[in-house]
Image (cartoon, rainbow, N blue to C red):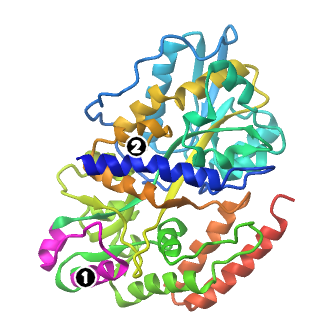
Amino acid sequence: MKSKWFSLLSLLVVVSLLATACAPKAAPTATPVPTKAPAPTKAPAPTKAPAPTNTPKPETKCPLDVEEGATIVFSGWGDETEQNIYRDSIARFSKVCPGVTVDFQPIPADFQTTIKARMAGGTAPDVFYVDDQLMAAFGPTGQLLPLDDYMAEAGVKRSDFIEALLTIFTYEGKTYGLPKDWGTLGLVYLPEAFEAAGIDEPTADWTWDDLKAAAEAIAANTDYAGFCQNADWARFAPFAFGAGGSYTNDSFTEGTMNSPEVVKAAEFIVGMYQDGSLVTSADVGAGWCGEAIGKKLVGMTYEGGWMVNYMRQDYPDVNWKAVPLPKSPDGKAADVIFTNAIGVNAATKYPKAAAAFLFYVTGRENQAEIVKTGFAYSTHPDQVDLVVDPNDAAIAQGGLVGRVAYWGPCTGQINDTISQALNRAYLGEQTVKEALDQAKQEADEILATCGQ
């Protein structure tokens, strides 16, 4: 038990070093985030775990003196589980700030496109999720409210948060969003598949070679497929990072996804697909690889902490486990970190009410409640020990070695070139090298015009 919490607490040190190395200057220059933290298409209603002893005491007053009669609209993406989490958050906020009415209007699909259209039409919500795309679109244009003065008034400090999660939401020294949560990946598996194959279960010392050997054994000797991984930039990122690769150079001016390191990692994955030890979720009739675990169709996959609630709700009788991701053959550990923020529309009629809601939702009290659901991890470094589920805690170890896949204002487009390249290679339309060479050309064109 002590070793687990020691590892989790070590995350603070690692993330602090990352934040120091990646502190932003005149524009977002750090290493956050994907356009959207990959999550299941369907997941469970929040399930409470035992309350940690250091759960923050409830707030006694509203973070700010809000405008009288304030009504604000709040929008985010996410399935019913995520929506329920924020409905509960709104209920808690209403007790602390009873003078503010929050109208929750979730946008489960096409969120970025919808918000951009509504912003252009003057009908955007007062408070909404902000990812790398929306930060690039609204931060430099003044359409997001700078939060720093309101933070000072409310006693909210940047140092309250894991600093590496803040950098993408910082522009010219101002804060335009506060991180709402973060997640990472672990190796999720079915013990019964390993028992059926007559092989030992995964450990934290596994390498890619161990993963491949186990996937081959499961595929050859059981009714389960071996390892599930779609043509997905996010699940491929730990392989690319573990090989020493990156999707762009440090200045976000050139694609590097066709480097020898990334090609090597992709050849490993595509080779598993070609030999049948790796399948996609569609290959086994599942909507996503987490569902393939729940339906007992595959032995292993890479998924995040969202599996905890998903399995509790949809597959409560399925015994599953998680360990940290396997290391590269030379022993390098790597993972990917997902994060998004919440920001305020600069045109809101009620900036103090909107900011108060944002501060509460991303604050320690509410973050602790969200951790209990198993949905995501707190964005506050002093709450890293709130994870109580053992599988969730194992997955969270990825935060010790993870990096955020941020490649500048057009991160989403760059990541898309990776997914598309992997798909072409999976289908045999191109070799891995040909597919990644094309991805580099596409990425260079994107980066040359990004932000103009």
Toward the right, the furthest residue is: 452
Name the side, left or right, on which 222 lies relative to 232. left
- Could you tell me residue 341's position as x and y percent? 60, 42
Looking at the image, residue 94 lies above or below residue 53? above
Q: Is residue 308 visible?
A: no
Q: Quadrant of the C terminus?
A: bottom right
Camera-side residue: 180 or 163?
163
Q: Mark 2: give few (<14), some (14-19) or many (20+) Cα within 10 Å.
A: many
**Residue that label 2 marks:** 375
Looking at the image, residue 438 lies above or below residue 228? below
Answer with the quarter of the image where residue 382 lies.
Answer: top left
What amino acid type is highlighted by mark number 1? Ala
Name the side, left or right, on which 254 lies relative to 320. right
Stretch of the chain drawn in magenta: 192-217
**Residue that label 1 marks:** 219
Was residue 214 drawn as part of the magenta stretch in this picture? yes
Pointers 1 and 2 in contact (C-beta within 8 Å): no
Residue at 59 percent of width and 57 percent of height: 34
Q: Nearer the viewer, mark 1 or mark 2?
A: 2
What amino acid type is highlighted by mark number 2? Phe
- Could you tell me residue 431's position as x and y percent? 56, 92
Distance, label 1 to label 2, CA atoms, is 31 Å
Q: Main SS of the magenta segment?
A: helix
Camera-side residue: 90 or 8?
8
